[in-house]
Amino acid sequence: MARRLADAGHPVTVWRRGTGVTAAEAAEGAELVVTMLRDPAAVREVLAAALPGLAPGATVVEMSTIGPEAVRELRALLPASAGLVDAPVLGSVGPAAEGTLTVLAGGLDGLDAPVAAKVRQVLSVFGAVREAGPLGAGAALKVAVMSAIVPAQVLIAETFAYGAAHGVPRETLADVLAVTPLGAMAERLRVPATETRYALGLAAKDLGLAAWPEATLATAARRRLQEAEAAGLGGRDLTAIATHLAATPHAASPEAGDGAPRGRAPRAVPLNPPTVPATNGMYSHAVRAGDTLYVSGQAAFDEQNRVVGEGDMTAQAEHVFRNLERILADQGATFEDVTFIRTYLTDMDLRMEYGAVRRKYITGTPPASTTVEVPRLFMPGLLLEVDVIAALP
């Protein structure tokens, strides 16, 4: 994409994390700042670091797949003088090089006409621009499309595995599917790609952005992808899901009836949703074992490891319960599915403020619960930490 901009005559500065130059230095003086990163946390990190270098009136064109909620958070992060457009794309490495991506743009109608024209001209370098509506509409449209395309590929991979378990060769099944509406997608999975065009781990992340209680098919497909990711296939092309399922005994097999290989417990799947700040790599935000979700202790700190609401129990509790809510939603669950909650407070005298927030999120019949006072938590300034166990729907 950067090469296409340069070839079209635009002066381009290219920057990526870990290169030594700061994001602020890279963005300094630019009229347009384009971000293309892995997930919401990465985008927030980079744009927060770039803020000191943003020129007055600069426009940020956010092209990552991060979902509409994250776009709204970015709008609040950026100064009012900065413009913001969300413009994720459909297409992978080949279309990016050829300039045949489909660009799903939101927020162009919120820019001044000359600025919007400049952004349209830049986006057209990447491919066909489809204006989706107001800010956040492009991000929502991208997630909606992926929540159909990715589960469909997982479904075909399961179909191949079912056929193999019952003596139907993949070639035969793919030939029959070729004359159905699923033909093109089945052809992609007939022989999984050796080159990574759309990483399996990114597909799991994208489905995580679409996690909501009614999204049962997307949630089930994401679980399959997370299992493959835990097996080391996260960097492989999404089509590797067909290879993974072909090698995994499952419910379709005559030899297995519970979705797990005979003689062993279901695999524990680590989960790190993109909607919450990344961990330090020493733990996962949650682990799913069968239909039980174990959520690590959540505390009030942001993506830069800064304490949120220092000295304010209400602010910290709100932050913690929003994180818990996002982690539960990532697996199609809500606080109604919580079976156990454990709270660590550094000052039991603040339990009334904590309890007021907790009652906003946990209503109805309360779960099993433990609350204890501790002398300190792992980061100075933290007032509480909360972990939960949930029975998944």
Image: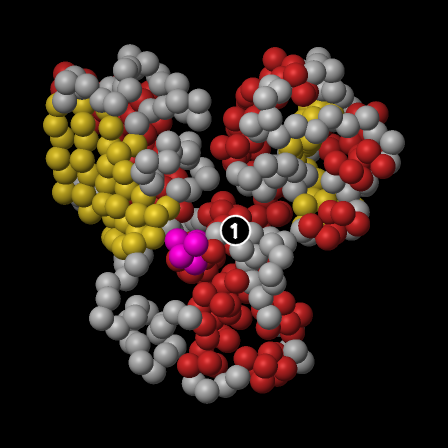
Q: Residue at x 28, y 49 (%)?
A: 293
**Which residue position holds label 1?**
235
Q: Looking at the image, which is closer to me, 322 or 360?
A: 322
Kindly identify the residue that appears in the image at 62 percent across and 47 percent down: 141
Picture layout, residue 69 above or below residue 292: above
Q: Position of residue 88 (x, y in %)?
A: 65, 42
Vertical arrangement, residue 127 with respect to residue 225, above or below:
above
Colour scheme shown: secondary structure
Residue type, label 1: Gly
Q: Is residue 54 visible?
A: no
Outermost residue, right side: 9
- Farthest residue to the bottom: give it: 167
Residue 137 at x, y percent in the picture:
63, 41
Magenta span covers which residues? 228-232
Residue at screen point 62% across, 17% down: 24
Answer left or right for 61 relative to 336. Answer: right
Q: Measured along the vertical axis of the image, is residue 134 above or below residue 262?
A: above
State left or right for residue 77 relative to residue 341: right
Give the mark count. Answer: 1
Which of the 4 image quadrants contains residue 16? Answer: top right
Q: Magenta segment: does it hold 73?
A: no
Query: In the figure, is residue 166 to the left or right of 367?
Result: right
User: What secondary structure is the magenta-colored segment mainly?
Assistant: helix
Q: Split into 4 quadrants, where in the image is the C terminus?
A: bottom left
* Residue drawn at point x = 58 percent, y = 42 percent: 65
In the rendered view of the protein, which quadrant contains the N terminus? top right
